[in-house]
Amino acid sequence: MCSALSLYAFASILLVRIDALANQQIDVLRAEATSVRHNWQPASQAEAPSDAIEELNSSLSGAQMEWIPVSCPSVRVICEKSRKCFALDLVRQLHSAKAAEDTHHHSNVFISADNIRLGEEVDNFEKTRERLRSKHLRIRSVLAWRDNAGFYSYPLYVINQLRFAKMLGLIGEKQPFVYMPESHHYFDACDDERRSNETIFNFWDRWFEPISNVTVKMMEGFSEEDVWEFDQATIQNIHHDGKAVHAYPYSTTGLEIRGDVGTQDWINCMRSRAMTVVEEHIAVKPALVKEALELHTSLFSGSKKVLGVHLRGTDKWITEIVNVDKYLNTLEDYNKKNPDGKFFVATDDPRFLRKMQQKYGSLVRALPVQRELTNVFYDDSVDKDHKCHDVLLDTLVLSMLSFVVKPWSAVSEFAVYFHHRYFPDIPLVVKDMQLNERDLDDKSSNCKA
């Protein structure tokens, strides 16, 4: 297990780089964004007037949330609706009666682990590929899932669309970018009172760095003819495809995705898949990484051993919640071997944190994040920026530790990604509490090293 001193050495180097970015790159991006807001001119007919917005509200999703209130800045309609840009359809089977009954997705789109057409299965694929390579890929979220998508669903949409676009050779000299202007549980595009001096009307640009050299101002200047998107059904199926990155074993319409075996080899393979994209394209805003490093220093200065503990309690519906007693058995074993070792607890469940504090007292550390007995992440009465800020800081502090105990969850899985992204030379031990220990299941795995 690595000492805290090693982390601080890496952190010092990283802080210097982050300070430079924070003082230069962030200011530049915000200045560009300010110019975009105050000088916005419609670039094409594909920007959404109020009647188009209402049509999308009713036709695109069965979700209960509004798509974009009419008072918001103009947004670019998805290509399949505007028909001003190319929408790539790779879905084999579009509809299913069973999918229509799925209360999780609010959509009748058929989803499976092998519902994406590749290469020769697509009509005129070579022509289509050459056409798309001359355009920018505009990465969107799944509009039909905005009422139940977790925070890290959004970076997973980005990771997997990039993965498939590269796999199919669809990215040429024109670089891809992320465009997620819609309101959802983690972003309010129309909070004019709080954001009167800001111009971040794109969820991605609020919390993450651009995935390429395409800036906010450049996006605004692109014509619709110069971009392409995966259509919505394709994005949904890419997210669940057996060749995609899955943060844990997925299920749809009540059934496990075929090949998501959840073994040690499977999750190791998924992490390798993820890192090929994360290392090149996915980075949290430098100011947040700096804040997390400072929190880590204040919480654990002088501590040689810290065990990171992540437990999701109130927002789990795809996989089962891990029994708290199972955690406590593992933690007790750690405490016996490391009586002076501290615990960093990242959880949305106040009951679990209280139980840890009662048992281990001053050895327990946690960030002062919002915790509720109900699902805080889907509670829109809770400040959306605070929710995002909290989950990112929990994830980043977890990523700085060398030993993490976790359930199947995208939150702590991204802590693993960020550890390898920011601290690749520090050894990491991960104990997945819901791991499938039947190694024979690897024969049917959709991800093999």
Image (cartoon, rainbow, N blue to C red):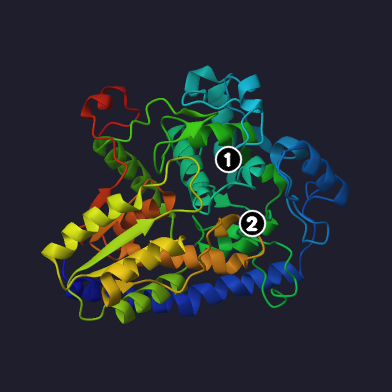
Residue 231 appears in view: no
Taking the spot 30% from the left edge, 52% from the top edge, the residue there is 325
The amino acid type found where label 2 is placed reads Met
- Disc 2 target residue: 219
Whole-percent x, y for residue 1 in the image: 15, 62
> Which is more toward the observer, 333 or 148?
333
Instruction: Tell us which disc is closer to us: 1 or 2.
Output: 2
Q: In this view, does 339 lie to the left or right of 348?
A: left
**Circle 2: element type:** helix
Residue that numbered label 1 is attached to: 134
Q: Residue at x 65, y 20 (%)?
A: 97
Tell whether 274 sits left or right of 105. left
- Residue 294's image quarter? bottom left
| Image spot of residue 218 (x, y percent) | 63, 59
Which of 201 and 431 lies nearest the eye of the viewer?
Answer: 431
Task: Measure the alpha-carbon separation of dots 1 and 2.
Answer: 16 Å
* Helix, strand or loop under label 1: loop
Among the 4 quarters of the image, the one containing residue 12: bottom left
Residue 204, relative to residue 323: is it above or below? below
User: The residue under label 1 is which amino acid type?
Assistant: Ser
Quadrant including the C terminus: top left
Residue 343 locus on image (x, y percent):
27, 68
Q: Which mark is residue 420?
A: none
Dot 1, crowdedness within 10 Å: few (<14), some or many (≥20)?
Answer: some
Q: Is residue 208 left or right of residue 396?
A: right
Q: Can residue 7 be seen in this view?
A: yes
User: Which residue is depicted at the point 67% across and 70% down?
Assistant: 199
Q: In which quarter of the image is residue 184?
A: bottom right
Q: Where is residue 149 in the image (x, y as percent from the top left)?
A: 57, 47
Residue toward you, 259 or 200: 259
Q: Earlier in the sequence, mark 1 or mark 2?
A: 1
> As rendered, which of 396 and 122 lies closer to the eye?
396
